[in-house]
Amino acid sequence: MTEASTAPVEDPTVRVPGAGSSPTAVVRTAVSGPITRPAPVEDPTVPVPGAGSPPAAVVRTAVSGPIARPAPVEDPAVRLFMFHHAGGSHLLYRGWAKHFPDDWEICLLDAPGRGRLQALPLIEDCGELVAYFHQALAPWLDRPFAFFGHSMGGLVAYELTCRLVRDGGPVPRWLGVSAYGGPPAEAGADGSRHLLSDGALRDWLRDAGGSPPKLLDNDAVWGKFGPVFRGDFSVVDTWASPRDPLSVPVPVSVFGGRGDTLVGVDRLMSWSAYTDDFLGLRMYDGDHFYLTDHRESIARAITDALSWTAL
């Protein structure tokens, strides 16, 4: 599977515990006029008042381990967990929460080794990464939930769904896969990018597109983020599709970019063989990172797909 990043992973100053943390931590930024007391709030949804406003506005992002909830909901009807691509972070989905129903809780995930979790070691094996998220998400699966993953995130979302099915516990009401093909089509599809030299890997990312020049051309910046790309590519490149991949008893929708030269329609359509309820393929203008230009439309498609399930 092919991966590239649209933006470097953020470097927040607040550390948050890893998997297994209690789902109660809240990071706050208090705002009064032009003065902001800093904290890592990635998607402020409350307007910042101008000078002279009363000191009452508080912008909040709730954080627990790898989960960031930009708009916490006290008693959500649905939790939507969103998995990022290789070399990326939850920032891929910054600004998406406002496009979903008010009673949905949008949960943006980070793999270890980036953002708030940069103090944790990178996980370079798909099975281990799935186990990490399985443990971290367990306390949050107490109501209807769904998964959406882009590129590497699609693989992780599928594998986590399979894990939940095998365990006999709650399973997602819906699975959305973006820019990632069905299991046999993807296993080993892109060789061993994680073993490339730094120069060769940077050239590969330039050709793939989606990575800003300042990340690829600046040695100091690459020294920080290069290991994240390499670790995530290891997750994808070393994943071996089971001999008999599980057809999940979950409705599956697939999304892709018409101009994506990395993942074609045939690979995307192969998902139809790995679900009992294939809801179809939606194509959008754009390349591998088409979704950054279509967040509102994709959010509407996700909402419509879940409306067909028994919530």
Image: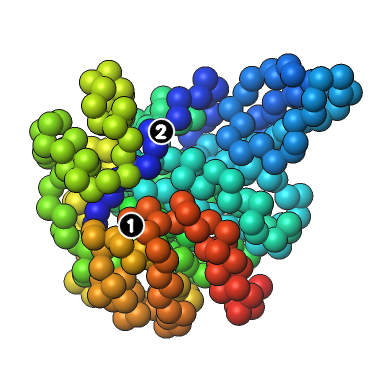
Label 2 residue SS: loop
Residue bearing the label numbered 1: 287
Assess disc 2: are there few (<14), some (14-19) or many (≥20) residues with their C-alpha within 10 Å of its C-alpha. many
Q: Quadrant of residue 253?
A: bottom left
Instruction: Confirm or deny contact between disc 1 and disc 2 (CB under 8 A).
Output: no
Dot 2 amino acid type:
Val
Q: Which residue is mark 2?
A: 9
Colour convention: rainbow
Out of 60 and 205, give the one closest to the viewer.
Answer: 205
| Residue displayed at 70% across by 19% down | 36
Type of residue at label 1?
Answer: Asp
* Residue at 25% across, 68% down: 264
Q: Where residue 71 sits: x, y (%)?
A: 68, 45
For image coordinates 19% across by 51% down, the residue present is 237
> Which label was assigned to residue 279?
none
In this rendering, does residue 32 appear at all? no
Where the C terminus falls, by quadrant?
bottom right
Q: Is residue 101 above or below residue 19?
A: below
Residue 289 placement, left or right of 26? left
Would you say residue 149 is visible in this rendering? yes
The vertical placement of 252 against 261, above or below, is below
Return the residue nearer the eye: 55 or 239. Answer: 55
Query: x and y percent of residue 202 in the render?
Result: 19, 35
* In front of the other: 6 or 11: 6
For residue 59, above or below residue 74: above
Q: Could you tell me which secondary element the residue under label 1 belongs to?
A: loop
| Corner quadrant of residue 7 | top left
Looking at the image, which residue sits at the far right? 54
Q: In percent of the image, x 36 and y 63: which residue is there?
A: 257
